[in-house]
Image (cartoon, coloured by chain):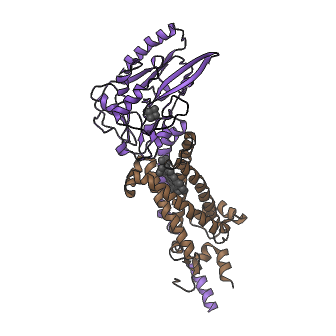
Amino acid sequence: MALQSLDIQARSATTTPVPGVRETPDLAKLIDISKCIGCKACQVACMQWNDLQGEIGHNIGSYENPHDLNDTTWTLMRFYEVEPEANRLEWLIRKDGCMHCADPGCLAACPSPGAIVQFSNGIVDFHQENCIGCGYCITGCPFDIPRLSKKDEKAYKCTLCSDRVSVGLEPACVKTCPTGAITFGSKRDMINHAKERILDLNERGFAQAGLYDPQGVGGTHVMYVLQHADRPELYGLPKDPTVSPLVELWKGIAKPLAIATMAFVGFASLFHYVTKGPNAVSKEIEKEVEKEEEEQA
Amino acid sequence: MRRDPRDLVRYTAGQRANHWIVGISFILLGMSGLALFHPAFYPFALLFGGGTWTRILHPIFGVVMGLAFILMVIRFAKHNLMSRVDWKWIGRIGEMVDGIDEGMPAQGKYNGGQKLMFWLLLLCMLLLIPSGIVLWRTYFDFPVEWVRWAAVVHSATAVVMICLIFVHVYAAIWVTGTVRAMWYGTVTRAWAKQHHRTWFEEVTKR
Ligand code: HEM
Ligand code: SF4
């Protein structure tokens, strides 16, 4: 998406303050898995609004279609047949896509200034015009979300419909969901709404129902209501996601440490020359060699 | 070309060309790599035609350097085997750094420091090549945990190698009369006698 507004909170590969005087409230999308019927209307709405048309694939005996997120599939219904208790089959259907982390690993990893931005409302957006196609965002993301396109070698993912939201509309998936499983609003409202849903689920026998808003990435701007919040793995979600310590190291202390080390070696060499002078061949040896030559001649 | 018929040949044209290919690709790799490593170096990307070109070109330079480097290792490894004298020389490297090297053990074609540098650079390349391939998303798709390790290993090793090369280049500049060995392949007899006496004696006795 293009840079339409200046309400930015963080910008990739940028070490000075970002244009961020405008402040907007924290927004969030809440996906209530207990209400989802797996109709994929949201998946279609996403393609339609964003003008995305994937290649026609093959049926491999699963409702998942296509089989994974890709450059033209920014949201995907994932189907899990699980037995949370013995002999109790459940069909869990999760709308997968970018979580819009408060602490986004993709943005931390991105080497290209301004290719990834985080708006003050919490949306994490890729600006493909600045994307160089290295795929570091994939390396940084704890949820395996961004995808490099084979067509243009740029990375793509869900924008949370930043274009619609910036003019006061809800994301296309929210607009289209026929059961009201997807809601959108301020993060506080969404958490309150989730609480009501969780109470309802508790009454219906889902004692472990809860909200998925993982604090390891600072919380997310896409949250789930899970029937089994104690076992997010059942839904293919990581239990305690964080930006990998390897990515933290690579994008954290390694950078200033590297500059300091290289500068030290460079300046040490310069000052060595300045203090010790060149290591020239000594006059003595020059004379010795000349004498040997004369003797041989 | 020998400026003085009495000069000693240190490198053949083929060896020098090989070394220059490695050197040039190293500079291109270092600058394009640093551009992707830290925003402070991102301006280097302009030298390669922008960020996308930098990302495309870096691994290609890497393949060129990798091949040229392997060829150079095959050519020079036998001259870089460490002996007891080399370790003795390294133990007294402080005197060399101080510029008071008259009393140091006599050295062959390469001194202990140069040999150690050779093996450290080889080690760096052995880490950089595979980690670079794992990072190369245009053609490869490795498990993400591998890519994370590769990113740490590749960037840390690159920084170590850049520092080693600073030392390598500085040593060549500091020791007057050395750089010409890489331009036209010869050194003076006096240079050889002062810095590589054992080698000098080998090549001058008939
Ligand atoms: C030998 C073969 C090499 C290969 C195949 C290779 C490949 C790569 C790849 C694929 C990347 C990721 C960026 C991209 O997609 O273009 C990268 C990054 C990088 N490379 Fe290399 N490279 C090699 C050698 C080197 C050398 C010799 C240096 C040292 C000067 C170096 C320094 C760097 C640096 C500093 C980065 C940035 C790492 C970061 O972003 O943290 N590379 N390399
Ligand atoms: S889920 Fe992945 S792509 Fe989305 S904001 Fe978090 S780190 Fe970035």
> Which residue is painted at 54% across and 49% down in the image?
B154
Q: Quadrant of residue A107?
A: top left
Front residue of A158 and A48:
A48
- Depicted A103 relative to depicted B97: above or below: above
Please state the horizontal and vertical placement of residue B13, each as a whole percent of the image: 55, 76
Q: Colour of chain B?
A: brown
> Which residue is painted at 51% across and 42% down in the image?
A250
Front residue of A49 and A185:
A49
Q: Which chain is purple?
A: A
Quadrant position of ligand 2: top left
Residue A31 visible to an observer of this rendering:
yes
- Depicted B29 relative to depicted A89: above or below: below
Classify residue B67 as left or right of residue A146: right
Q: Spot the residue most to the top.
A: A203
- Depicted A112 relative to depicted A47: above or below: below
**Total number of numbered labels?**
0
Residue A265 visible to an observer of this rendering:
no
Please state the horizontal and vertical placement of residue B79, each as a whole percent of the image: 66, 69
Q: Spot the residue most to the bottom.
A: A297
Quadrant occupied by the C terminus of chain A: bottom right
Please state the horizontal and vertical placement of residue B131, each as a whole percent of the image: 56, 49
